[in-house]
Image: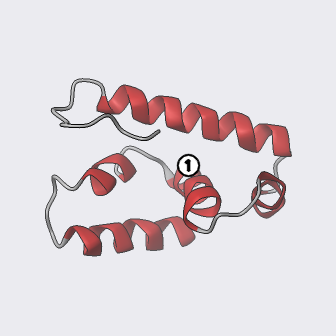
Amino acid sequence: AMAGRLFDEAQEKAQGDPTNLVVRLLENLNEEELQLVELRFFEEKPFKEVAYILDITETNAKVKLYRILDKLRKVTHGWDLEDDLPI
């Protein structure tokens, strides 16, 4: 699936380093969440197209993505990061 490919690519880019930020973030997402993130951010598709591909409404796609970003913010809370995440 697309989401699995995204995770594999992120792991490759991390070159086996489990502390890589992207990999650590992606590990917290389920298959549906990964798909949405990949379509919206990695493939840069508009919400209308993301919604069509995932067979959900455009509003639902926006709500789900907002919740994913909120979830990732909570996950990273307390991480020892030098800079704030741009999400």
Image location of residue 2, percent across then percent down: 55, 71
Q: Residue at x 43, y 41 (%)?
A: 86
Q: Residue at x 75, y 58 (%)?
A: 50
Q: Amino acid at mark 1?
A: Glu
Q: Residue at x 84, y 60 (%)?
A: 52
Image location of residue 66, percent across then percent down: 62, 34
| Residue 72 vertical placement versus 16 (above, below) | above
Image location of residue 49, percent across then percent down: 81, 61
Helix or strand or loop: what does disc 1 sit on?
Answer: helix
Q: Residue at x 56, y 54 (%)?
A: 37
| Closer to us: 3 or 40 | 40
The quadrant of the rendering that contains the N terminus is bottom right
Image location of residue 83, percent across then percent down: 25, 37
Q: Is residue 60 left or right of residue 81?
A: right
Colouring of the image = secondary structure
Q: Is residue 81 left or right of residue 41?
A: left
Residue identified by numbered label 1: 33
